[in-house]
Amino acid sequence: MTDHVQGIDLTAPVERATRSLSQGGLDFYEVFASYSRSIRIAIMGKGIKDTGSSVDVGIGVRAYKGKGLGTAYSQSLDPSDVERTANTAMAYARVAQPDPFFKAIPGPSKAPDVRGLFDQKVADLVMEDVGGFAKEMMDSAEDVRLGAMYEGGVSAGCTRSYLMTSTGVSVEDERTILSGNIAATYRQGEDTGSSSEFDYGVSSAGVDFNWVGKRAAEKAVEQFGSKRVESASLPLIIVPEPASSVFFGLMAAISGEQVVKARTFASSLLGKQIAPDWLEVYDDGTLPGAASSTTYDGEGVPTRRMSIVGAGNLRAFLHNSYSAGIEGVETNGHAQRGGYGVYVGAGPANVVVKAGESSLDEMIAETKKGILAISADFTPSMVTGEFSSTIDEGFLIENGEKKHPVKNLMAGGRILDLCRNTNMMSREGRTFGKGHFFPSLRISAIRFSGD
Amino acid sequence: MSFCEARFFEEKSSNIVVENGVAKTLGSGIISGIGIRVIVDKRWGFASTNATTPAEVDRASSDAIGGARSIAAEGVEEAVVVNQKLATDSVVHRAKMNPDDVDPEEKVRVLLELDKVARTYSDRVKDTFTTYRDAVTTAVVHNSFGTYVEEVTPRTYAYCRVISKEGSNMQTGIEYGGGVAGFEVVNRLQDEQFSRRAAEKAVKLLSARPPPTGTYTVVVDQRVGGLFMHEAFGHNCEADSVLGGQSIVADKMGEKVASDIVTIMDDPTMPKNGHFVYDHEGVKAEPHTIVRDGTLVGFLHSLESAAKMKAQPQGSARARSHQFPPIIRMSNTYLAPRDMAFEEMLGDVKRGVYLTGMNSGYVETQKGQFTCRVEQGWLIERGELQDHLRDVSINGLTLDALKNITAVGKDFKMDSPGTCGKMGQGIPTDAGAPHFRIDGIVVGGRQ
């Protein structure tokens, strides 16, 4: 893949667009171009299904005139298409109405490079290598138990991008990503045991395909014999995967224009207690080698380590320049650009929850009757903060032990109650993409809807 | 090489964002490129490129062939395709009002009017967000059977989200509409006061309460019913899931899987959001019956699954763009109507929940467990609608739920234009149903 990533020139089309835009009487403009190449292997049924490779190139323009925003993007870097893209954005900017909240786009900043975001070994992977990883996942699952039907895949890719703005930002980025996922399904008469696992990282050393296959199979086998549970209010224990949905849900509710325009349940929570005083959460875009790290955010502002929840108190919102302008503060480097498709939002880089002092085994042992959630999505409604989630995989706990897997069970409540009622946190947890870290949590009581 | 296919795809789109009476963003985008798919040494290979120069297309072809050869030694099930009847055709779906012929200023004017209706509905409306999108896609499929088909399709959508507030209570109401059509869609939605409906929902939900928890008889409206048919059952009938061992109905062809009053169809020929004439393998689309009077009678097929299951493809393989291979997808999925009136359906319910408006849903096909998040609900007490409910989700086991459908209404509607995601590919679909009633559904909430 290497030759492709290094061989395409993004500078000339970006500069061409910039030249056109500079003559358009605009107040501000941004040009972003990216080039990526990826290869993938798909798994289906008993083995590898097919292969795929993709080249994706494009350029996006954001043009501001009189506080109105015009955008355009194209997958062609041909000079005429680049100029047409710039002209379309300019024409639309003139039709757009003034956005009273818009202030300006950021100027240039300098930050030390975040290291370890590009792995030459991943860039050099060929289809045979990726197929080997896919086979490794299936083999390790078969070692646990023979006879699963699989669905999943492995992909490897590298991306190079270039951002240039009218305010002097000029930022290049180059990165790799390698990922694998597999779902294993076993049948035993009318009974089904099914689960999935995934891993991803910047480098080949950061992704454990053997572990992914093994864990998917182990979890699938544990799901045989699932039973319904009666509706009740019970303690809930969640392992790091579903715990991530709690914290990502919270991060989404404190990010960007949605929070500062009072569109989320968290809009009035800055500086308030939202969790037990021992809960610490920070976001850090500078972690070396983490898949979600970047030296600069989507607007060219340096990323940073920042406390989000300290002593249970909500310490910060995650801003891009637009939301920061509304609040009258400086952006804190959380702009997220969705490729050349021109949308710029805001969100976290690497969310790290400080580990607790308990263990998952202790949480289970201390629970007379409760539910252990292995797979569930607790992302709440951004407006109301309420969630109503199926326990996709989980267990009934009785007298400190896992009794049987559950099915047809939902948990409902407010995400803030879930945070406030967290009474145990594990010291062990899971690191995702070498950046995000989430421990297991125990919540004192959640309303379950079942039989 | 036993099969090859080249697929050109282009999408030209434009969009407008109106927020609280300000048309703050106008945008446009063009995606285009070629996807190449081959069977070489009995293995699939796929490659795509945005650059359509001869050199880049040659490179993509080489990548696809090389990819297939790279797994030739693996113990992979052989790739096959069913012999396809050659098709040569060019289809252009004409919009009454071609979006390209409507000035951006005129689009903005109409969107501002829609937004204003929502914004001025009540002083409890605190935030409005109204968007518009049109896209014209061109798909050209050429394969080694000699098929060469081209289809040009305009799609136009509008969306309105309203946030209402009273003290610390904040609620949201959403409406949307659109499909295979031009700007006339927006005029129709304006006539139907769709943004007013969004505002009305948001305001009325301020006095709604969370649902009770437990297992109930539920009556669902056309949108929830369509979502249920699509998520809970339709995905299980996609033959790639069946072949991959991920479907709960893999071994149930010809068996009873639902109550006698259930007939489920997937029909790409209906002029709704999932409409097309040729799929992305160049197969002419036909209506597919999946369940007839409670019996499973059909799966949705691609050229490959049809070959492996000795079936006839009826046009169910689509791709998000040139960057993805075609996979089996639903189109316009629905439960066929029967003859019961809505009031009659409610009348038999002692205590249950009436659910309206879809939010989102997903299914674990391998386990047959589904979850649907809906917009709002009402308690049913002795056949009457009582307390208004918010933040409602339902969960169930697909086969149990289908067998527990005890009433199907006559008020059919298909009005859920949306995007279905599968394997990273979002595809336009629609779903519909009449009102219907199911026993034994778990209703989630916090009370």
Image: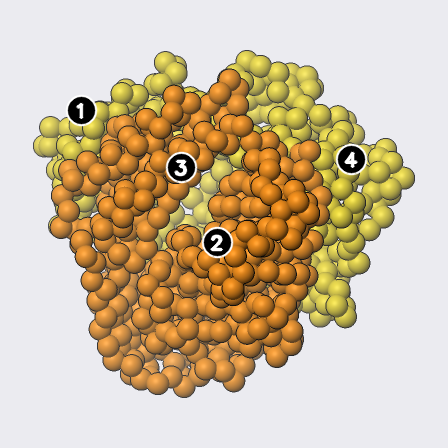
Chain colours: A yellow, B orange
Q: Is there CB contact under 8 Å for labels 1 and 2?
A: no
Q: Which label's residue is closer to the chain start, 3 or 2?
A: 3
Disc 1 versus disc 4: nearer the observer: 4
Q: Nearer the viewer, residue A14 or A184?
A: A184
Name the residue at 72% across, 60% down. A193
- Tell me the kind of residue under disc 2: Gln
Dot 4 falls on a residue whose secondary structure is strand
Q: Which residue is mark 1?
A: A66
Identify the chain of the residue marked 1, using the numbered disc in the image.
A
Disc 4 versus disc 2: nearer the observer: 2
- Tell me the kind of residue under disc 1: Gly
Crowdedness near tag 3: few (<14), some (14–19) or many (≥20) residues, C-alpha within 10 Å: many
Label 4 to label 2: alpha-carbon separation: 35 Å
| Residue A311 visible in the shown view | yes
Q: Which residue is mark 3?
A: B198
Name the residue at 56% across, 18% down. A314
Q: Which mark is residue A234?
A: 4
Identify the chain of the residue marked 3, using the numbered disc in the image.
B
Q: Which residue is mark 2?
A: B222
Disc 1 versus disc 2: nearer the observer: 2
In the image, is residue A398 above or below residue A327? below
Q: Which label's residue is closer to the chain start, 1 or 4?
A: 1
Disc 3 versus disc 4: nearer the observer: 3
